Every structure is written in C-alpha cells, then in structure tokens.
Image (tube, coloured by chain):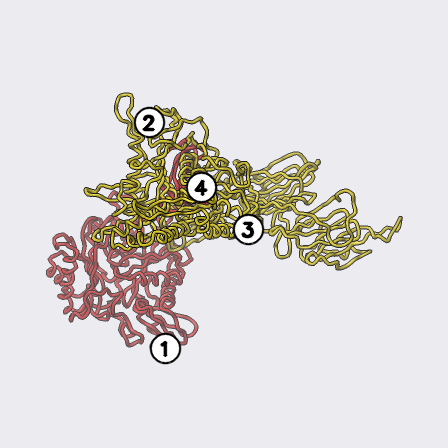
Chain colours: A red, B yellow
Amino acid sequence: MRDQGAASGPHPGWAPPWAAGSLGGPEAGGPVGRRPGPADGRLPAGVDRPTLVIDVGPATAAAMVVTELGAWLVPDPASGEGRWPWAVHWDGERTVAGAAALQRAQVDPGGYRAGLWRALVDDDVVVLGTRTLRSVEVVAEFLAAVRSAAARLLPSLGGPVAPPDWAVVTVPPAATDALRRRLIGAAEVAGFTGVELLPQAAAAVWAPGLPLRAGDLALVCDVLGPDTGPAVAATLVRVTEGLPEILGHGFSADANGSVNGPPPVNGRSPAGGTSPVDGAGPGDIQANGQDGPAAPGGIDRALADCRDLLGRLGISRTQVSWVVVVGGGARTPGLAARVEHGLGIPVATVDEPELAAIRGAAAWLPRSGPRRVRARGSTQRLVPLAYTLPGHTARLLRWLVEPRQPYAEGAAVARVRLANGAVWDLTVRTPGVLDEVLVPAGRDVRSGEWLALVRPA
Amino acid sequence: MPLTTLVVDIGAHTTGAAVVVAGDTEAGGASADRAGSAGFATLLRDPHGGAARWPTRLSFGAGATVAVGSAAPPVRSVNPFALLSGSRTALETWPRDDPDPHPVTAMSAFLSCLRTEAVRLLTHTGPAGRPHPVLIDRLTVVVPAWYPPADRRRDLLIAAGEAAGFAEVELVDAATAVVLSLPSVGSPASGVAEPGPAVTAARPVSPAPVPVALSPVAAPAPLAMSTAVDSPTQPELPDGSLVIVCDLGQTWSTALLRIERDEVLPLAHESISAGQELDLRLLDDLRAQTGDWLASRLAQPGEDGWWARHQALEFVRQMKHALSQREPGAEVSGQPAPGAPLYTLGRPWLDRLAEPGLRWLGASSRSLVARLAAGRAGPATRPVDALSGLATLADVQAVVLAGGHARLAVAERILHEELGRPVIRLDDPDLAALWGAVRFASAASARRIPDDHPRWRVQPVAWDVPAGRARLERWLVDPGEPYQRGAVLAQVRTADERVYELTAPDDGVLLARPGRVGEVVGPTLVVRAKRPASLLAGDPPDLRHELAGCGEWLFTPDRRVLVECAATADLVRLWSVPDGTLLREFRPEFDDPPGRASSAARTPRRRGRVFVHPAGRLALVAWDETGAFWVWDLYSGAQTTAFRDSSQPTAVLVNEREWRLSTQGEDAGSAGRYRRSVATVWDLTTGQRLERFTDDWRRRLAGFERRSVSDCFGDAALSPDGRLRAVPVVTKAGPAGVSLRVTGSDEEVFRREHPPSTRVRVAFSADGQFLLANRESGRDSRVEVWEL
C-alpha cells in the first residue's frame, strides 16, 4: 500500500480556519473538535515563516512543509511516496536522496548508503564512493535534498521561492543528548537556521482525528515493522493544551524478547545496513511505505512491557484514557483489538498511522506560539545600575530594595563585600524604581557590571 | 536603633574586643541617653581577669555551656584561631574521645560569647525601669596581613560570624587597621563625599564601659604614640604616603601600604614566625638555667607535661615584657613557681635573641619596596603608576611597630638601622589594630559607592527568556555591529527544544553581549546596545570632563590616553580618557648634552613635543635655543639620547617612521645677505648626526613633520562604527566649536560652540564612547570629553 493520497495537496491536518472548509482542517471533522487546542475558539497563532517538519524513523523519514496557509507533505520525488528511504547516493558529482538513491544503487552500489539514521545514532563514518563523510555530513546531505524538494513545492503553495530555513524534527523520546546535537548539527549544515526537536510521541498525540482531551493520559505505542526487528516504543504522555508532557517511555523488541528495555536510538535498533541488500535496501522498501507490520509474536511481549511501564510510573490502567497506536506496524490486522484486550484500555487510531507523528507535529506547530521574542518595550528609559568597585571585584551580599520598589536619592540599594573583606553599600545618585535585578545576591560582581535595571524618576 | 558593631582582633594567644555604637541621628535608642546623637566605642575587657585582651581560648562545658578567655581553663580548651589555620596544637589536651570541633563552630561560639559580654555591658536600665537590650548585628574582625584576599580562613571567619548571628561581617587586615589607628591618617574609607556619623574611641581605664561622647568629628581619636626615633615630631602621612607596618605578634610580619585618597591600600607583605621562635628560645634559656627542675616537669606525660610547658611559656613571656622597656643593661629575675630556681634574663641577651628576626624584617621591608618599584606589588587590578615605578625607601614616610613584641626596645633601633626611616612605636601596640578596626567600623556608614553615571548612548536591551530559562544557541550580531529594528540578535533553545529568536526593538549597535553560546540564560537576557545616533539631537550627550593645560595635546594611537606636553617641555602628563584620571606625570631633568658646553648666563628657552616611536612608545623630544636636544621615553622616564647641534634651531621636524630629527638653522659660515639655512638630520635612537644639507633640504626631508603624525586628533574624525562624523565649527573669526553629524545624511545631531580659538581638533575614543575636542587659544589648550 502506497502513501494514501498524501503525496500532494494539503493534508487533512491543521489549516487556518479561513481555509478549513476547503482544506479539510480540524474544524471540519467531528472528532477533531475534541482534540487539544484553543478551547475558546481563538485562532491558532500561525507560524512565523514556512517551516519544514521532519519525522525520522529507523528506515524512512517524512517531511511536511507548514506555512500560514496550511501543511503539505513533501513526497519523495522519485517514488511519490510520503516517506523517504534513509538513503543517499553520490555519483561523483552530486548527491541524491530517498528513492532516487535506491534506484541508482542498482547500477552503482559503491556510491550508495542506506540506514543513515542508524549511522547517525552510532556516529559512524560513511563511505560514498571516493568520499568519506561523518554521519552528520551525510545526514545533512539527505536533509538538504528534502529541503530542496520542499523549496520546489513552496511556490505552488503560495509560499516564498526560498527554501524553508526553519525545521522541526521529531525524535524518539529516548534520543540521547549527543544524538540530538548531531541531528541539530546536520540540519544546520543542511541550511536550516533554526532547528527544533519534538518528541515523536508528543507529536503523535496531536495527530488529527484522535479523540484526546487536555488532561488525558495516553499511552502512545509506536509499532515498528519487521525491517526494524518488530518493535514497539511505548510512551506515556499527559495531554495538555500545548506540548504534551512525556511521563515515561519504554521499548520492546522482537518476539524472543532479545531486546527489551534499551531505547531504539541507543541500542541495536535496526535500521538499514551498509549495502543495498542489507536492511532497508532497494528491494526492501515496504509495501506500505513505512517500516512494515509488527510481528504478531512480539505483541504479547510488547503488551507486557507496556504494563511494566505503567507499573514503573505508578499509573493504573484506569488512569490511562487511551492507547494511541501509531507507526507502520499499526496497520497489522487485529492489532488494535489485541492491544485493547491485552491492556484493558480503549485504543485510538488514525487513518494513516505511519504519518501520525508528522501530521501531529504539523498540527502542533501553528499552535505552539510565535518564535520571535521582541525586546521589552517601554516609554520610560531603562538605565543599568553599575558601580566602580574599589579593587574591581566584590561579592554581592544582598539587595536592600525589592524589584518594583521605589527608592530615594542617595539610598543604599545593595550591599557588597570587597575582596579585602570590607562591606560597602551601593547607593544611587538619583531617585527611581528598581525594575529588575540582574545579579542575584551571593554572586561575585565586577566593576561596571550591570547589576540591575532601574527607571529613573 | 543605632548601628552597633562588635570589633574583634583575634590573635594567636590573645584577643582584643571592642564595641562601637554609631551615632543615632534620630537621637533615640540606647546611645541617646548617654551620648546624645554621637556614637561611642568602648573596650571589651575580659570579665574574669579584667585584662584588655582575652586569652584566645574556648572550652565547652556540660549542658552546652561555653566559656571563653580567662574563664576557659587552659587545659581542655581549644584555640579557635589555631583551629582556623588547621593547627592541631590547640587540641593537644582535647579529650581524645570527643570529636574535633569544627573551626567555624569553635569560632562562632567564641564570637557569640564576646557578643554576650558586650550586650551585658551595654544593656542599661531606661527611665521606666526596664532594661534596654542592645542589638549587636555587625561584626568587624581583624585578620592577619598574611591572610590573602582569597584565603579560605577569611571565608571561615565570615561563616563563623554569620553562624553567630551577625547580619554583616566585615574583615579588615591588621596592617591596615594599625595604619588607621594613627592620628595623621584621614577618615578611613571616606573617599566618597558622605562622612559617617561622629564616633570616637578612647582607651578606657576600667573594665566598666566608659562611653566617650564626642564632638562631631568623623574619626575617632587616635592612639597615643611614642616619639618616633630620629624624628622629634610625628611624621605627617599625606595622601600618597607609603607606610611600613611591622606587626610583631606571635607571627612577625611586615606590610607595605599606601595612603591613597583617605584609603589605606595594602601593597605587599611578608611574614615569619619569629615571635613564636623567640618564646621558644627563651623557654630553652629557662630550661638551661633551671636544669632538671623544668626538664622533669616538661617530661611528664599527658596534661601534666602540657600544663608545665604552658606555664613556663607564660612565665618567659612575662619576663620578656617586663624587660623589654628597661634600660639597655638591665636584668630581671623571677621564679617560674614557688621553690623553683631563680631565672635571670638580661636585655643584651633578649636583644640578641630578637635581633635575627628584626634583621629579617628590615631586609624584608626593603624587599617590599623593591617589589613595588619593579611593579610586582599592589593590587593586580590597578595599573602600576608613576609613584610605584619610582618608589624607594626614601618614599616611606614611617615604619609603624605594632603587636606585643613592639615593646622590645631593640626593635626600634634595629629597624631604624635597617631602613633609615622614622620608626613609630605606639604606646599600646597590643591594641593598635583593635583601635584601628574600631575606627574602621565607626566609618561603616561612610563606605558608600555611588552608581556610575549611565552612559548616554549605552542602553540595555532586555528580553524575557521564553520559559524562564533557555540555552543560548547563537549570537547573530557581533559586538560593534549595527542592526536594524526587528533584526534577530540571538537564538535561544528552551528545555523542550523550541528555538526562539530574540529581535531588536529599535535600530542600534550591539556593544557587548552576556553569556557564551551554550550557556543557560534567563529569566532575562540583557545586552548592551548603543542608541541610534539620531537620538543625540533631542538628548545631547554629557560633558564627561574637561582638561585644561598650557601646552599641546596628543591623542595616542590606541585612542585611549591623552598626552599633555607643556610648550617648555618641562612637564608631560598622561590622562586616562574614560575617567579623566592622571596616569603619569613626567618632569624631565635637563643636563648638558655632549658637545660645546653651554655658556649662557640665563637658562636657555626650551621647547618640546611628544612623538611616537616606531615601536609605539611615547617619547618627549625637547630642545633649547642653544641647539641642545634630549629624548626621553615617557613610560620608563629614562633619557634615551641627547645631542647638540651646532646651529640655533629655527625649526625642528621629526620623521616618526625612521625615528630621525631634522633641525634647521643658519649656517655658521654664512653672513649678511649670503646667510643660508642648513638642515641637519639626527638619528633619535643613537644621537648620531646623519646628514647635513645646505640647500634644497626641504625637498630632501620628506616625512619630517613638526608634530606627531600618529596623533589621533585631526581636523575631522569618524566614529569607529562609521555612523558619526565630528568636525570643527568654523566661523569667520576662526574655529568656534565642534559639530557632530550623522554619516551619510550629514544631519547635525550635536553642536557645542565656544569663543573663537586658533585651532580645533577632534577625535573619537577607541570604543567610540567618547568624543574629544581639543581647542587651542593664546591662553590655554583644552580638551573636552563628551560621553556618547
């Protein structure tokens, strides 16, 4: 099964209300109205600029471009699929990514590399023909290709000609700091000036069509496919008006239980290999465009791990409102019923579970607030409070006035101890109001350092 | 309630304490009944012995009771001062089963007991028959000069004071306190124009508190001093004086200090444990004279042996003090205990034992002055000034002796021999540091630092960091770089991995940015920015200072220092641009350079200018009408060369790049209508004559100029950020002001006019924060510094 009608055009997720009717936004569907969002009917804040949302899976990635007008999937240009295989090919002059790389690998396997996510996790060196690249560099080339595809798409959507320079990347909740930094670094090398990370489970909760309300506890089960060694990543989240709160997560892999516990990003989470026949190679692309169905034999183990997770967190099943099953493996027939029966918690699903995270991220983004913070404005000039200290340094012992408190001319506003042990009072020449303390008591201060902001009377 | 401070001078063996009650301007509180609105200070005597100093010891009794001073039995007590230094000697008789007391615990208990005694003495019965308790919430502790500023023992003392419940704990080093006790030192720490309330200290003669109401003067009465050796009157200690303090306690130390604008500035110190060694030598002497009597007692195990040693040391100390002020050949005798052999100590022997330590102090004091002269003394945060660079022992105004061993008569003699400077021994040297600290504490209310004048064009730009805290992702504008309204100046990343852009509210220039990339910032992020120049039109800048002189001014190539050179070349001053302080003053000494000797009956007229050596050093080039030339390096003050030209100079030019000088004059061999001018070129490095031209010399002297070409003053100036341009205001009568314009639009945003002058030159400081305008007239030459 190919990506289902998501290769072009607006997706059925978020769209501004004025376009909701035509684009099928959340307001158009019944269940969507129950999802977290502005309950008072206020409009979502929108986005500052066209933003590329990227969902990274073990073997494939997906991207959506989000503008003020809506959100659209960026399909793999070679396959038309909604998800791009994590693969690149370098022919000696240029790099191609996704399905195009798979195609070229048939004739030139030396310049091909799949499993880029795994390479990034392990921070491997990647060889593409005569080039030797760090994993960050090769992932950057992959992301640059996706960004270029988005740039070609944007003008037709009423956006600017320039490629998007802001990215929101969904990541597994257990991603290490090092992996996060590498991912951010790769995106920055690809040309993004701002790179945000969003936990995949938190994004999935925002997927259109889920019956969640603010305050619900939801167990998000991301069911991966056989090419990843049948696995379920379970994350317990608390649904809020904004970004859902991650309460805990666990990971369960294969029916034999050989992997149980280590998160996929740190352990041997399977994802592609180093050759076209290893892992998500050219012939391995899944029929549904995602990572394949979960093996039925692993479900019992996964359910046990879900129960363990709840037990570890001290959460009873009755406290959990929904189990949200997402990921390519969620399409496995009978899976939802088995999960619901096994856990005793109602199961919520979406139409395209393999795109739940990216669509959720695209829906969350316009509601997450602006990313531009303007400096404080004031009709009255702010003046810094600084002192020339005998001996240049001192320890700020205490403030003698509180923020917002007015003071008179000559008043002592703070007390310091100099390096020689003498205690001095810091005074003001003119009356005013202490606006904000910049240096708290107990810290060492230097001559000329701004200790506070004041408004002269 | 008046400010009340406990002042403590904790020594290795004894501790002095006093309490200072500040003047109560509202005429209320405890002091009002006694001393009106004036403050007072009183000595806190050991209530058990009545001595002025308490033994520095502490014992813990049953029921958490604590005894200090004479009330604490010597055996099974601890010395909190020794504990502070990590010494185990104080714990020799401490019960083995008991855990060692923590230094802070012991010291805070010691201080608490002193405060309890102070409160008991100060609490009095009011008119209604009810006691008026006194709150003592400030503590001033004298710390040894050998505790450097970052020393852990200082932190322990502060922690102990705070643990004892004092809201404010101040430290003052002993040498500074001793200097403050001198009558010729001004009010301590009163560099700011806010004098403290009237407080006076005096030496009480009885254990009871005898507060002394004072006339409203800012400083307490000084201690009495004995006449200084070789000085019939007490030496004056004016501003800038160097003083050496020799503190002769158990540790002997010498400290070099400078009295600077009523502030006492420690410059360097050295110390040695000579006091302890002297006592140990006397103990050996006692052992030798008493034979088995003492040896057998010292050999006793446990507390008995410790007690015998303790008593023996006390005995020799008493003998030492009894003898120290006697005539040179005197002897004293005594028995360490009834029935013990007689012990005799003579002045010659005592002097001989003390002499090595005193000689060491003399040598060490000379070393301190040498270190100062070499620029290796003084606070690291201050630049080495001219006084430091030229310091010699002759600049030391006085050598002050303090501490118990200052009573040794030989100390005055030996230190005078060693240093050749007036030696002052205070009448009560044991309490000198304490009374100085009292004076220091009484001036607490005068220790006020006014805020800096806010810079006109510098303003804070503040953002509320999203989520309160975020990691600084990157800066997008570098310091010094202009930005426009709405521009993104920085990115921050919150804990939930959202990235926010911090944008500018208005046009400006980023001056400084806090925090490094990767650091967590919040809840507010503030940067320094420069306001747009266009705002100058409605809000003119402040005149920071104006410097007046009679010579010419040069602005150094680094655009940080102003150089004033008198036309007669007898004075050169270097001024700091930001604060207008005098950095260096140089007065050259003119000698006769080699060559034909001067035979003029009067002093020849001299001229001079400052030029910049190719290596960047400032040099004074001076000459007189007889053809004598001199060159001095202004940083070192050294004359680098001198030479004599055969002709009378009519024009002197300098080529700074080649460091050569040309002097023009009349050819001595020409006469009448055939007079011809000649130019001689000299090497300013070697003082050698290089060339002599008799004709066409003007063409050959390319690169030679009358004034420094490195001078940053000019007929126009562009600000470092390129946004402002300064030019003189020129009228028909001549230059009459300075005008500041926006580059590009040429819009005038600031103008300052003054009477017409002969020349106006302008410049910007290196950081662009100051506009400098130099105007010269027939009467004077001024530099105005405007803060932008």
Please identify the quarter of the rendering in which residue A109 is found: bottom left
Label 2 vs label 1: CA separation? 94 Å
Q: Residue B707, position in %: x, y?
A: 69, 49
Q: Quadrant of the N terminus of chain B?
A: top left
Residue found at x 16% / y 64% = A302
The residue type indicated by label 3 comes to Ala
- Please check whether the numbered discs 1 and 4 fall on a single chain: no
Q: Residue B56, position in %: x, y?
A: 32, 44
Labelled pair 3, 4 in contact (Cβ < 8 Å):
no
Q: Residue A107, position in %: x, y?
A: 36, 78
The residue type indicated by label 4 comes to Gln
Residue found at x 43% / y 36% = B448
Label 2 vs label 4: CA separation? 41 Å
The residue type indicated by label 2 comes to Ala
Q: Nearer the viewer, residue A137 or B176?
A: B176
Label 1 vs label 4: CA separation? 100 Å
Of the numbered discs in the image, which one, if any, rests on residue B30?
A: 2
Tell me the residue that label 1 is attached to: A110
Tell me the residue that label 3 is attached to: B373
Left or right, A44 with reference to B761: left
- Please check whether the numbered discs 2 and 4 fall on a single chain: yes
